[in-house]
Amino acid sequence: MDFAFMAETFWSLLRGAPLTLNLAATSVALGAAFAMLLALMRMSGIAPLDLTARAYIFVFRGTPLLVQIFLIYYGLGQFRPTLQEWGLWTFFREPYWCAVLALTLNTGAYAAEIIRGGLQAVPANQVEAARACGMSGFLLFRRIIFPIAVRQALPAYGNEIILMVKATSLASIITLMEITGIAYKLISQTFRAVEIFIVAGAIYLVLNFLVTRAIQAIEWWLSPHLRGAPVPAPRLDAAHV
């Protein structure tokens, strides 16, 4: 192992970290909003909405993300005249926005089931207690249902966020120079794949370590009832003197 070369490679690959984090954060944020919509459609009890959400989730969870990126970036490019007519070509001609769209649609399908599970895990007795206190509608959802659902879904959703950080590496196939894209470029110049991919893997590992710590901090903040109570100091009284 050439550690001097690996140190130089580290700084080169680190230039792609902001784009990696940008892709992950944007797609996770947009995907969370879309996933909430899909989860509500699944739980609406309205057959057309439920079937539409089920079909969407089935398709995007059942096909590879790589295929979805290819279809959005290369496939939709075949319809350039139509996209230009509709004013959408400025969006689909940019690799960044195509990658964000593919990642958002993909994570939305997975996150929808996570959110639905969290909402359904809210204890019915707590909902009834809130209704007995006069809460209803959006207030009930905001004060009782949503906070409990977030605590229930956060561990599984944390895994989805980590997967999305790693999934951003697929954006390199549509010319985006994030961490993996820069790694491929360096390999084509130096033919030293082992050292470069070791460094790239280490950077992804550090990024995901920071993500897991942030998720654990949020989970700790949302779960005051699970925090360890301080152990009271022993007290001497007259019986022990």
Image: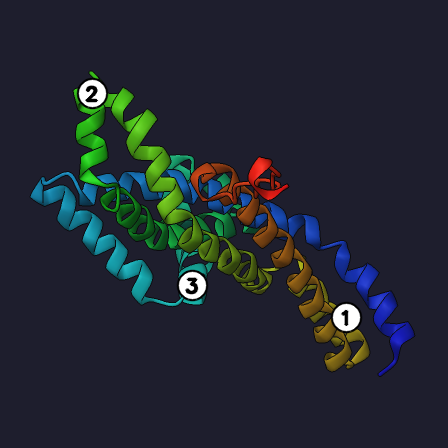
> Residue placed at 40% from the left, 55% from the top?
156
> Residue placed at 23% from the left, 45% from the top?
120
Disc 1 crowd rating (10 Å Cα; few below 14, some 14-19, many 20+) is: some
Q: Which residue is mark 3?
A: 65
Q: Mark 2 or mark 1: name the one nearer the start of the chain.
A: 2
Q: Give whichever of 136, 56 is nearer the camera.
A: 136
Q: Is 51 situated left or right of 77 in this image? A: left
Q: Is 6 situated left or right of 236 in this image? A: right
What amino acid is found at the position of numbered circle 3 in the picture?
Answer: Leu
Observer able to see residue 22: yes
Instruction: Please identify the quarter of the rendering in which residue 32 is found.
Output: top left
Q: Mark 1 or mark 3: name the one nearer the start of the chain.
A: 3
Location of residue 155 in the rendering, given as x and y in whole percent from the top left corner: 43, 53
Q: Which residue is mark 1?
A: 186
Say which mark, if any, is on residue 158.
Answer: none
Residue ranking furthest to the top: 134
Instruction: Please identify the quarter of the rendering in which residue 206 is found.
Output: bottom right
Location of residue 51 in the rendering, given as x and y in whole percent from the top left corner: 14, 50
Instruction: Please identify the quarter of the rendering in which residue 47 is found.
Output: top left
Separation (CA) of disc 2 from disc 1: 58 Å
**Is label 3 in a helix, a strand or a loop?**
helix
> Residue placed at 21% from the left, 22% from the top?
137
Q: Give whichever of 33, 138 is nearer the camera.
A: 138
Q: Give whichever of 180, 140 is nearer the camera.
A: 140
The image quadrant where one finds the C terminus is: top right
**Is label 2 in a helix, a strand or a loop?**
loop
Say which mark, if any, is on residue 136.
Answer: 2
What amino acid is found at the position of numbered circle 2 in the picture?
Answer: Ser
Separation (CA) of disc 1 from disc 3: 25 Å
Image height check: is 238 above or below 167?
above
